[in-house]
Image: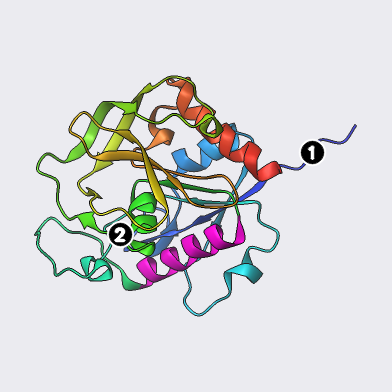
Amino acid sequence: MARSRRPQIAIPARLADSTSATRYSGIVTARRLAELVWAAGGEPLTFLPVLGTTWSERLDAIDGVLMPGGADVDPKRYGQEHQSTKLYGIDSLQDQADMELVRYALTSSKPLLTICRGTQVANVALGGSLIQHMEKPHLNHLSVIEFQTMDPALGIADSKISASCYHHQAIDRLGKGITPLAFAPEGHIEAVRYASASWAFGLQWHPEDNYLDESRQLAIAKAFIEATRS
């Protein structure tokens, strides 16, 4: 009996000034993130951020979209000037390509999972804003996230989850059609649901960091992959 095909998951590459495996600048996907997608049953595929292309054509055979973590979104994208010296890695091409991909995924009903920067990008793409630099950044920070609204589609039943965080920005004003689900002890939003005809959720934390020890992180990824099968 033939095995069923692994759902193909598009992950837009992060633009890197240099990598240990290339002589010049590179495009990268975090290995741990790709391994999480594989462990959940998907096939992770890296896509080059390019302007002026048609995502519907590029992702015609793709089953789902995963927006990964990365550098900061340019505050000008949400109508603000730079207010912090801690902003880093801003890239106009990256911002524009990511936002176009988020909007495509939501309007085309492609299942969508956003992580860290990916969740911030989605919020900005939908008209929201960000806290440019948190009073107490969560860098290499392990936090207990609490869900105030449980959604069974996310694949977990517990209201609390141990989450690995690495971010110095957070959602401020919510974008259109975004529902907050979970919060950090400090009060900022850590998980959201997007208005979509398909499965569409965002996490502010990095489930790839501790999915081997925290089974509920893998359960979320499996719920995403299962949604892409239908």
Say whether residue 26 is left or right of residue 81: right
Residue type (three-letter) at the residue carrying disc 2: Gly
Residue 66 position (above or below residue 82): above
Residue type (three-letter) at the residue carrying disc 1: Ser
Q: Nearer the viewer, residue 160 or 152?
A: 152
- The quadrant in which residue 94 appears is bottom left
Q: Earlier in the sequence, mark 2 or mark 1?
A: 1
Q: Which residue is painted at 23% across and 39% down in the image? A: 188
Q: Secondary structure at mark 2?
A: loop
Q: Which residues are magenta?
A: 93-109
Tag 2 residue: 128
Tag 1 residue: 4
Indicate which label's residue lies in the foreground, 2 or 1: 2
- The quadrant in which residue 82 appears is bottom left
- Image coordinates for residue 151, horizontal then vertical, percent: 49, 32
Q: Which residue is painted at 61% across and 61% down in the image? A: 108
Q: Which mark is residue 186?
A: none
Q: Which residue is painted at 38% across and 61% down in the image? A: 126
Magenta span dominant secondary structure: helix
The residues bearing labels 2 and 1 have C-alpha atoms spaced at a distance of: 39 Å
